[in-house]
Image: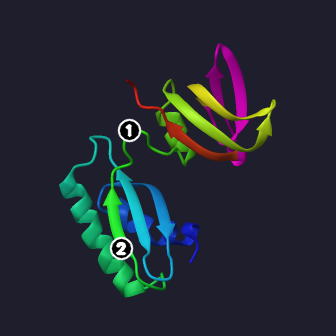
Amino acid sequence: MTSEELVALLEPAVEGLGYELSDLEVKIGNRDGLLRVFIDKPEGIALEDCEIVNRQISTLLDVEDPLSGNYVLEVSSPGLDRRLTKVEHFQRFMGSDVRVKLRFPLEGRKNFRGALRAADEENIEVEVDGKLHSLSIAMIESARLVPAV
């Protein structure tokens, strides 16, 4: 099962509990696997939130059995250096500092670190050293918030 299919399976259950499925990390190996689910809500995430979602997802995974092999299920908050994976994430954190890595070089570089200035369905704009760079969301390999010091 692909990550996208797994998100489609888990997202309704997570949202039904009042949380956002922020991100997903899947590492299934021969002996030790990991399914890490990142959840969020406007007030932030507490340990109890992770426990509630863990129980719900665990039951769903037992019934649907979408992953082969052994794995550990972890439910966590996205953290201060959260990955930005959806257009809504970019829009929510407008003005924040971000670190973006592109799949292919643009203007001779793949890495951009600066203030997130704009975001729509296709592009984000990051201001680096006073210069605005328009980056295609489709070209982003990874994007993370840079925690405030």
Q: Amino acid at mark 2?
A: Val
50 shown above or below 125: below
* Residue at the extreme top: 130
Q: Nearer the viewer, residue 110 or 3?
A: 110
Query: What residue is pinned by disc 1?
Result: 80
Which residue of the protein is positioned furthest toward the left in this rendering?
48
Identify the residue at the far right of this view. 107
Q: Secondary structure at mark 2?
A: strand
Where is residue 17, by image quadrant? bottom left
Q: Residue at x 63, y 21 (%)?
A: 127
User: Where does the image place residue 52, in percent across and percent down from the top left?
Assistant: 23, 64
| Residue 125, horizontal then vertical, whole percent | 65, 28
Q: Quadrant of the C terminus?
A: top left
Mark 1 touching mark 2, by CB under 8 A? no
Residue segment shown in magenta:
119-139
Q: Is residue 59 above or below residue 46?
A: below
Q: Which mark is residue 38?
A: none
Q: Residue at coordinates 33% horizontally, 50% vertically from top-left? A: 77
- Is residue 116 something one can see in this rendering? no
In the visual, does 112 lie left or right of 9? right
User: Which residue is depicted at the point 39% across and 56% down?
Assistant: 38
- Tag 1 secondary structure: loop
Q: Is residue 59 magenta?
A: no
Mark number displayed over residue 72: 2
How far across and down, in percent of the image, does residue 12 sit? 41, 66
Residue ID at (54%, 32%): 98
Q: Nearer the viewer, residue 39 or 98?
A: 98
Type of amino acid under label 1 = Leu
